[in-house]
Structure formats: C-alpha cells, structure tokens
Image (cartoon, rainbow, N blue to C red):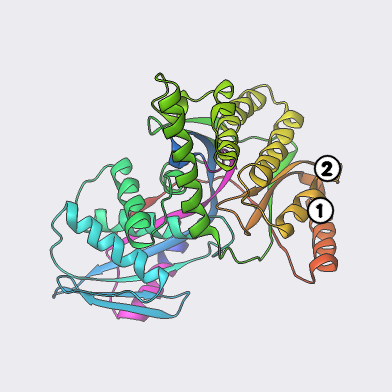
Amino acid sequence: MIFSDDVISRTSESFFDAFQMHPTHISTAPGRINIIGEHTDYNDGLSMPCAINRWITVTFSPRSDDQIYIISKDFNQVLFLSMYAGYQPDSDWKKYMYGCIQILSDVKKLHGGFNALIEGNVPVGSGVSSSAALEVAFMNGLNAFYNLKLDPLAIIKLCQRVEHEYLKVKSGLLDQYASQFSKENNLLVLDFQKNTHTYISAEMDEYCWVLCNSNVTRSLAGSKYTERVMETQAALNQLSETFPDIKHFRDIKEIHISAVKNVTQQKRIKHYVLENKRVQDAIAALEQQDLTHFGALLTASHLSLRDLYEVSCDEIDFLMEQAISLPYCLGSRIMGGGFGGCTINLVKKNCTQEFSKFMKFAYLKRYNMVTEINEYISVDGAHVITL
C-alpha cells in the first residue's frame, strides 16, 4: 500500500520543508498501462488497462486567505494565484492545476485558499499517463480538502473536462478511469458506452508486462488525436445516414465498414470495430489462460494501430518487431496516444534481463538512442488520507 508510515512521514517532511507547516491531506494517484483497447475510449468502446506502481502525490494544507500556492517539486516551479482572480497558465502542468480548480469551482463553491506540493515518479511523456495521474490526484485531493463529497465517476469526468477545455485534447476517460478505479492484481475491463467496469485477474503465470520507451517525443499526439476523433465521428455520421439502425459507435459491425466511402475514415472505423473485438477476445484468452493467443492479439492491435489508425512511428515499429522476434516475448504493441512513447510487451519473467539487454543494444545500434526498459505491476487506484 502506498500510504505506509514511511511514505506519510517522508511526504509530510517534504511538505514541511516547503511551507513550514504540516499537511492536512495527502492524495495520490497512479499512472497506468493499457493492455489492449487503444483509441476506443472516446468512441464508447472497450479497453483493458490497469494502474501501475508509479504515483503522483499531492499534499495540502489550508491558508488563512484566498490565495493558492502550488509547488511542483519535479519541475521546480511554482503556481501562485488568487482564488477569485484571472490567471493565464504558462506551462502544461499549470494548465492542469488551474483547469482542475476552475472546473471544480464551476460545480461546487470553493472557500479559502490552500498550499499544495506535487511530487511523483510517473515518467513524463512515455505513455503511462502522468497527466491523468496528476489530474486525478489533485482533483481527489481538492474533493477531500473542501469536503465536497463528489463520487469517483464524477471526479474523473471533471478531469476529462480539464483535458478538453484547458489542454484542447478531446480525450476519452481511459486514463483517468484506470488511475481512479484500478484494483491491485487485477485488470480493468472498461465499457465506455455505459461508463462501467469489471475486473479480471492480472495473473500472467510465468509472464509479465515490460515497457520499452522509445524516447521519441510525442509532438504530434495532440493534433493527430483530435484528427482521429473527427475522422471516426465522420464515419459514424455517414453510416448513420446509410443504416438507420446505426445510432452509436457500438452499433457498427464489420459488415458495415465497407460502406464508409472515404478511405481514411474507413480505415479508422475498421480499427475501432476490430479493436473492440480484440478486447473481447483478450478477455476470453485470459479466462482460458491462453497467453499465446493473448500475445497474438497484442501484436494484431499494433498492426492495426500502425496500418489503419496510423498512430505509430518508425522507432516504435522497430521496437515491436525486435520484441516479437524473441521466443520469450508473446506479443508487443504501441501503447497510448501514439507517435512515440512506449511499447508494451508480454515477456517471460525469467527472461526480462535478457530482453532488456537485447532491446537496448538493438535500439542503440539502429537509432543511436537509448530505450528505457521498465517492468510494472498492477496496483490500487487513487486514494486520499486525512491527517
């Protein structure tokens, strides 16, 4: 459990060093990996993520005025503003913080300022959703600090609004959902049409999840993400006109795909339909402990994301191809928004060191770049304690 006595003590000391007072609340939220079901959440699809053992922690204490003073320990930067005055964020982390405060204040009246300290170990820009961990930790902390009594689903929907309105990224709920609702030793199965979830055991027997970070900056992810949202929506609109029974994305079946006239839009919606099916097939494979088939589904997902959704890049494709050439890797695919970031790989536990050595050497030789290799385990979602 993240809130061991040691963690509470260390976090409290860090806060005291910054503000010369003790915190009243500690809020934490984990990063996430997404096993399968990529680029489906914003179109009411299916996904299978889990939270990982990397966290963002936000500590709070009240102020006697209406000022808000937030320190980002990792960025070594400060955000200082008045609760009721205008403010123009000049960096992404400040947009997240300011967006959370403003959107929450649209829903509930916030009384009084606060001090906050942010620190964490979720890798930034590597596809494990440090931004969602930041939002979820901060929003949960505000909810507890102001005693607003918002339910967890309401909290993550507010976080999604921050993405839409302050970062201008039309994201779905996958990242926030995984950070909020995950359960240790389980994978989430998310249905974004209903915003419901179930759990399935994360036990992989002799295998584990290993991420290879391409260290390619995902500079296109935001704009291209929005393009994909528009392209799939256009495909749905056309199909709705052609087939009166199609009203929602999940009404689209494989037999409908060829009716989409625009070639690009047809490719996008084909990925969506087949990726949802792969999630369902992955559930069955896990239930039957057929990890060979499960791994093949991961690789099929990558090929679809590369060829149909077109969100991969040369470096990521190379990492995937190298991984699946190894007999102890059952499957590999790009994970996250795309255009860089990480691959996720299903690797035999007793071969992870060999895998890491091979991948690092191959990537350095090909691109003269270092790939970071990380092995993760599933953990519980967001949590707040009051001191």
In the image, residue 178 sits, relative to residue 58, either above or below, namely: above
Secondary structure of the residue carrying numbered label 2? loop
Picture residue at 47% right of the left edge, 63% below the top: 6
- Rendered location of residue 86, percent (x, y): 19, 74
Amino acid of disc 1: Phe
Callout 2, which amino acid? Tyr
Q: Position of residue 317 (x, y in %)?
A: 74, 52
Residue 236 in magenta stretch: no
User: Percent position (x, y) of residue 345?
Assistant: 71, 46
| Side (left or right) of 168 relative to 23 | right
Residue at the spot 52% in from the left edge and 36% down from the top edge: 47
Cα separation between marks 2 and 1: 8 Å
Give residue 355's mark: 1
Disc 1 packing (10 Å; few <14; some 14–19; many ≥20): many
Question: Hey, which quadrant is residue 367 in on the image?
Answer: bottom right
- Label of residue 328 in the image: 2
Per the image, label 1 sits on a secondary structure element best described as helix
Magenta-drawn segment:
10-39
Q: Which mark is residue 132?
A: none
Residue 63 or 3: which is nearer the viewer? 63
Disc 2 to disc 1: CB gap under 8 Å: yes
Q: Nearer the viewer, residue 263 or 267?
A: 263
Q: Residue at x 40, y 28 (%)?
A: 248
The quadrant the C terminus occupies is bottom left
Q: Residue furthest front?
A: 261
Q: Earlier in the sequence, mark 2 or mark 1?
A: 2
Q: Is residue 20 magenta?
A: yes
User: Taking 179 as reference, is 299 above or below it?
Assistant: above
